[in-house]
Image (cartoon, rainbow, N blue to C red):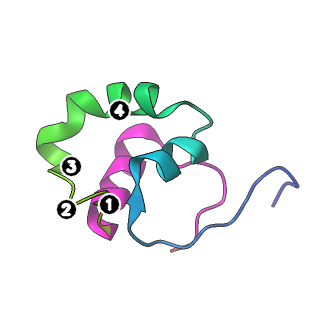
């Protein structure tokens, strides 16, 4: 693993947390998700569940260093 990569566990994440993994602001991240909303589904409260997070990673590419 390269020094600039960070490990993070697979769990539910908020849009803000996910946007930070991709090094973009939340507004940009939400715009990236827009085309995939039907596949990802709606958040439950503030968080995307684990299956939604996996789908986001499939659609946008995996940010460096996640753990299954």
Front one among 35 and 48: 48
**Foreground mark, 1 or 3?**
1
Question: Label 2 belongs to which residue?
Answer: 44
Give left or right: position of 1 versus 35.
right
**Foreground mark, 2 or 3?**
2
Residue 4's spot in the image, x, y percent? 83, 49
Q: Residues within 10 Å of mark 2 (few under 14, many from 20)?
A: few
Residue 10's spot in the image, x, y percent? 47, 71
Q: Residue at x 34, y 25 (%)?
A: 31
CA separation in Å, label 4 and label 1: 13 Å
CA separation in Å, label 1 and label 3: 12 Å
Specify the quadrant of the image occupied by residue 13.
bottom left
Question: Label 1 belongs to which residue?
Answer: 47
Q: Which mark is residue 30?
A: 4
Disc 4 + disc 1, Cβ < 8 Å: no
Disc 1 + disc 2, Cβ < 8 Å: yes
Magenta-colored span: 50-67
Question: Label 3 belongs to which residue?
Answer: 40
Element class at badge 4: helix
CA separation in Å, label 1 and label 2: 6 Å
CA separation in Å, label 2 and label 3: 12 Å
Specify the quadrant of the image occupied by residue 2.
bottom right
């Amino acid at each position: 693993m390269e020094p600039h990569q960070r490990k993070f566990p697979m769990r539910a994440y908020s849009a803000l947390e996910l946007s930070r993994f991709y090094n973009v602001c939340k507004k940009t991240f939400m715009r990236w998700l827009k085309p995939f909303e039907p596949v990802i589904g709606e958040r439950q409260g503030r968080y995307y569940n684990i299956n939604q997070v996996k789908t986001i990673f499939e659609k946008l590419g995996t940010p460096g260093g996640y753990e299954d």
